[in-house]
Amino acid sequence: AQSVTQLDSQVPVFEEAPVELRCNYSSSVSVYLFWYVQYPNQGLQLLLKYLSGSTLVKGINGFEAEFNKSQTSFHLRKPSVHISDTAEYFCAVSLGTGGNFNKFYFGSGTKLNVKP
Amino acid sequence: KAGVTQTPRYLIKTRGQQVTLSCSPISGHRSVSWYQQTPGQGLQFLFEYFSETQRNKGNFPGRFSGRQFSNSRSEMNVSTLELGDSALYLCASSPTAGNTIYFGEGSWLTVV
């Protein structure tokens, strides 16, 4: 079975400080990995994704994430956050094979609160 | 290119009623999937349709159903509504199998 764990439900940080949002997954097969962001009263917007290739993935709004297969992690980072980054962030995995196309498993989300 | 469009955005229903939500995928996308988002359970996969066929189904009761039309538009239906069905229902579309999904703004359902 697949599962996604986001250990931090809330992360407070001051503006211009760096931030890391943690994501660990459990799967017996290879997975695709994603980070989505949700602003209040909106749907989910894709930040970045790892399908294959380089383990360091760059996304929109200055975010990046690193896939670590041995630690089954896909942590999201930003070197300097802005007030506008305040939102909820979701890590997700997709099997992408064996008939499970587009069946995504989401973590419980991390609320990033950027303070001035 | 227009994004995923969901209608209605907000609706209030009474227990026991039924509801139909609509989703128009991004042009050219043939896969449509549905998710339920609640504060307690988070984001949960409902089902996925590809070329008018249900290809995957989550662990929801039979009251939750869906369909996809030849133009890839999709609808989901919830019958005999319960208070616990109050949630944000999100539709997502994808151009190919096993790739990225793109979400709509969602339909907020409140059951009273």
Image (tube, coloured by chain):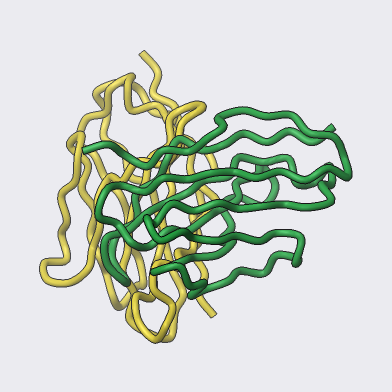
Chain colours: A yellow, B green
Q: Locate residue A8, reporting x and y percent.
A: 50, 47
In the depicted view, which residue is nearer to us: B110 or A4?
A: B110
**Quarter of the image that includes the N terminus of chain B:** top left
Extreme left residue here? A54
Q: Locate residue B82, reporting x and y percent.
A: 84, 47
Question: Is residue A115 shown above or below A78?
Answer: above
In the depicted view, which residue is nearer to us: A12 or B61?
A: B61
In the displayed structure image, the side of residue A67 where residue B36 appears, left or right = right
Question: Is residue A25 shown above or below A56?
Answer: below
Q: Locate residue A32, reporting x and y percent.
A: 31, 69
In the displayed structure image, the side of residue B95 where residue B48 appears, left or right = right
Extreme front residue here? B70
Extreme top residue here? A116
Q: Locate residue B43, reporting x and y percent.
A: 56, 52
The image quadrant that residue B52 belongs to is bottom left
* Residue at the image position 85 percent from the left and 32 percent from the top: B112
* Residue at the image position 19 percent from the left and 39 percent from the top: A60
Question: Is residue A56 shown above or below B106?
Answer: below
In the depicted view, which residue is nearer to us: B107 or A66?
A: B107
* Residue at the image position 85 percent from the left and 35 percent from the top: B14
In the depicted view, which residue is nearer to us: B70 or A95?
A: B70
* Residue at the image position 11 percent from the left and 67 percent from the top: A54
The image quadrant that residue A79 belongs to is top left
**Figure label count:** 0
